Amino acid sequence: MKMIPSQPYSASNKKSNNAEYRVFDKLKESFVGSNKYIAFHSLNLTKHQYKRFGEADFVIICEYGLFVFEVKGGSISCNEGVWYSTNNDGKHNISNPFTQAETAMHAISKAIKETKFNNLNISIGYGGIFPSGSWIVKSSEWDREIICDANNFKNFEAFLSKFFKYWHSKKANQKCGHLSVENIKAIANFLRPNFEMIETLSSQLYNQEEIVLKLTKDQYKLLDIVAANQRVMCSGGAGTGKTFLALELARRIAREDKRVVFVCKSEWLKQYLTSKVNNEFVTISTIAGAQVDMRRLGVDKYDVLIVDEGQDLFNVVDIDKLENLLTGELSKGEWYIFHDANHQALEVVDKDALKFLNDIPHAEIPLTTNCRNTNPILKYVEKLLDVDMGKKDEINGPKVIQTFASGEINILENTINQLLADGVPTSHITLLSDLEYAKSSAALLSDKLQSKITQLDDYSIRNFPSDGVSFAEIKNFKGLENEVIILIDLPKPDKNIKKDKALYYVAMSRAKGLLNIIYTN
């Protein structure tokens, strides 16, 4: 089946995010080789019955007609007519999924009938997909044929075939014929036409944000591989999604009522991650404070250890601290260490610490797909610093801007003002320097611009991104990111100086959409 788009949209604001990715993959694997099936992910609806703007999770146009699916992940329940979804974030009210799908179906059908396709008799239908559970409840409000649960999700193509025939045979659709390939393509082009327009800078950043924020399909599969092993060293360069994968792994393991300790070195990263996780079975700690946190919780040992930015802990002192946190220690316990594959090329490594870890039986899993940086950023950093930034689809973004100047303050001020004029929100912009704020170029900006700057620290990072333009020292921003990074107060790096390469590598790889470097002469 042809999918439009070819990769699933990011649905970071939806509770069903992972479920939609699974459905997307199943649809893509169905009716392979046939030109009579086209599916849309997340189709906007302007003709919705009761919403100003609506959305359909999945819409299929095929020889049998037009069909709409609503997808719900997690556990679904209904009590006295009120529907609920339960997932890692708790229990939430949701709309009746069948009502959602039906109203979306009528909205799309109405839009089609108001066009040149009004003479076509098109079969229409709707259904619900619940890939995480078994649907056993019977009701007069739905027919079993329109429900795909975890059981028939395993043979999804067979379910779809029965589903299409069920709706095509309904009384209201009996006079409808089969759609030709030409009509299928024409309706598909009406629902989501191809076009080209010139994008503003802010639009480029917003579009790129949808792409780079989501975990790729391969990375979701990797989670299953990681979780299937008791001990894992997961390596990947900056931007390959290590932190997101580590957090998701912690959440998954916590569902088994196992106590998980998530360890990093940076206090900033610890505070930031703590704000993202609300689970009594997951403790976020720095390596320096992990023992204290464990005593405060009254825990003798943790069941599982997860380490992020592990390259910062590849020394015998910190390895020994990790040993004392884990049931069975490192040799026999359950642990997952995420580390940067470029670390050994950029910095001096404690070989004894690495040998100790490598001698323990474990799985080695590489992360090779960059899901943070645009291609212009990725290629710039790779060429300048001779590091592997991972592979990425050919997705364009704003080019990297580099300036060599003695009048750095004026250039910096003009750069920020231009970004704001282009519609880039202040929260999307971070200034990175190797100097503290008082000694940096940012401290010399006009009072008007300085009033828009938030100096990040280990407290304010919990609410990052803030409302204003943020400022941070490079060393503290490791493991974090923002849409626009403006790098200041640094000379052009010398490829022969390893410490410079490591510093620039961290700074440049923080940018998701736009990297602007103002080199000092």
Image: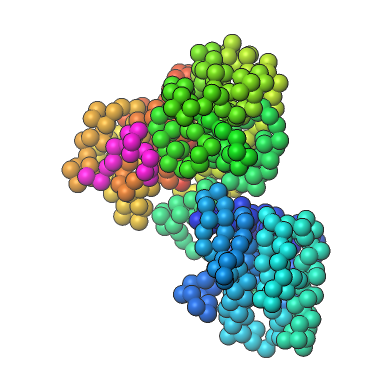
The x and y percentages for residue 197 are: 49, 63
Q: Residue at x 62, y 54 (%)?
A: 74
Q: Residue at x 67, y 36 (%)?
A: 227
If the image is split into quadrants, where does the N terminus sit?
Answer: bottom right
The residue closer to the viewer here, 85 or 348, is: 85
Q: Residue at x 53, y 30 (%)?
A: 261
If the image is split into quadrants, where does the C terminus sit?
Answer: top left
Magenta range is 451-465
Give the image's coloring scheme: rainbow
Residue at the farthest left position? 447
Total numbered circles? 0
The x and y percentages for residue 279 are: 51, 41
Residue at the farthest top position? 352
Query: In the image, 64: left or right of 215?
Result: right
Q: Considering only vertical position in the picture, is 84 above or below 418?
A: below
Q: Is 463 within the magenta?
A: yes
The x and y percentages for residue 421 are: 31, 55
Let me know if residue 493 appears in the view: yes
Q: Quadrant of residue 136?
A: bottom right
Q: Is 246 within the magenta?
A: no
Let me know if residue 388 appears in the view: no
The residue closer to the viewer here, 233 or 208, is: 233
Q: Considering only vertical position in the picture, is 113 above or below 94?
A: below
The x and y percentages for residue 185 are: 69, 72
Q: Considering only vertical position in the picture, is 313 above or below 89?
A: above
Q: Residue at x 41, y 55 (%)?
A: 202
